[in-house]
Image: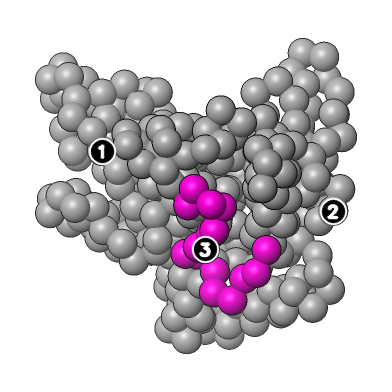
Amino acid sequence: MTHEEQVKRMTDMIAKFVGFTGKKLPDDVIAKLTELREKETEAMPKVIYDTMFRNQELAVKLDRPSCQDTGVLQFWVKCGTKFPLIDDLEALLKEAVVKATFETPLRHNSVETFDEYNTGKNVGKGTPTVWWDIVPHSDKCEIYTYMAGGGCTLPGCATVLMPGEGYEGVTKFVMDRMTSYGLNACPPLLVGVGVATSVETAALLSKKALMRPIGSHNENERAAKMEKLLEDGINAIGLGPQGMGGKYSVMGVNIENTARHPSAIGVAVNVGCWSHRRGHIIFDADLNYEITTHTGVEL
C-alpha cells in the first residue's frame, strides 16, 4: 500500500468511526445508564430512562445521530514518534470530519468567529480541536474522538484558587458550578475535574478526565476518595435524569491532576451529558485497529 493509499484508508476509517460514535453510545455509558435506571424508584426518572433507551434503539435502527447537536469534533491523539502517518495525522483528521459531516450526516457546527458564518463542513480555523500526547519510540497511534456539544463540555469553567482555600475550595468550586450551570447539559452527567497549577492546565485535564472509562479511578488514593465524595455530593442535589428529579445525577466524577505551584491551585470542571459520545481507537503501524469503547464495530 502506498503512502497516499494509507492516508486515504485511515481517513475513511476515522470518518466512519466519528459517524458511528454519534449514533451509538460507548459500552460503559450504556452499562451505567442501565444501572441507574434500575436503581431509580420513582415513576418520572424511569420514564425518562426508558425514553433515552428508546432514543438509542431508534438511532441505530434508523442509522441517525442520537442527538441533534453532534457538537464540535475534538480529538485527543496519543501518537508514537514512529507511527508512519504522524506527519499527515492532523490534516487527515480534518478531512475525516468533513467526510463524516456529509456521510453520517452531522449538524454543521463550525462558525467562524468574528466573521459569523457557518462553514457547512464542521471545520474552520482551529476546528476540529486536536490535542497531542507524543510517545517516544512507539509505532502506534491512539485516538479519542469526542463530540462536544453546546451543553456538554463547551460551557466548562476554570479558575485559580489561592492556596489557603485548599481542597475544600476545590470542592466548593465544583459544587457551585454543578448547582448553577450543571443543568445546561443533560443529566445524568459525567463530571470531569482538573486540579493543576493554572487555568489552562486544569481546563485541559478536566476535558481529558472525560475520556476515562466510567467507573475508573484516579491512581492517587486521596484523589480517588475525592471523586467518590463529589459523586455522592452531586447525587445528593437530586437533579436526576434530564434534571427532572431523581436519586442519581451523575454517571461518575473523574479527577485528573498534575503537580502545582505552592501558591496556587488551578481547578476546572467539564461535564459530559448522558449522551456521552466518546470513542477510542488504536492503530498499529499497518493500520490494523482495535476499538476499546464499543464492541462489535467494523470500519
Determine whether the residue tagged by mark 2 lies in a helix, strand or loop. Answer: helix
Quadrant for residue 120, please give it: top right
- Residue 50 in the image: x percent, y percent? 64, 82
Quick check: 248 left or right of 275? left
Look at the image and tell me whether residue 272 can be seen: no
Residue 249, quarter of the rendered image? bottom left
In the rendered image, residue 9, in percent from the top left (x then y), is placed at 70, 49
Residue matched to label 3: 291
Against 129, residue 30 (above or below) is below
Q: Residue at x 58, y 82 (%)?
A: 46
Q: Which dot, 2 or 1, sits closer to the camera?
A: 2
The residue tagged 1 is 257
Q: Is residue 296 a member of the stretch shown in magenta?
A: yes
Q: Earlier in the sequence, mark 2 or mark 1?
A: 2
Say which residue label 2 marks.
103
Residue 39 visible:
yes
Which amino acid lies under the numbered mark 1 shown in the image of this protein?
Asn
Say which residue appears at 29% left-offset and 27% top-offset: 266
Seen from the viewer's position, the closer of residues 138 and 172 is 138
Tell me how far mark 3 sits from mark 1, CA to CA: 26 Å
Q: Please rate how many residues cluster around mark 2, counting C-alpha atoms within 10 Å: few if below 14, some from 14 to 19, many from 20.
A: few
Total of numbered circles in the picture? 3
Local crowd at mark 1 within 10 Å, few (<14), some, or many (≥20)?
many
Q: Is residue 241 above or below residue 161?
A: below
Q: Earlier in the sequence, mark 3 or mark 2?
A: 2
Q: What amino acid does circle 2 point to?
A: Glu
What stretch of residues is rendered in magenta? 284-299
Q: Earlier in the sequence, mark 3 or mark 1?
A: 1
Q: Position of residue 6 (x, y in %)?
A: 66, 44
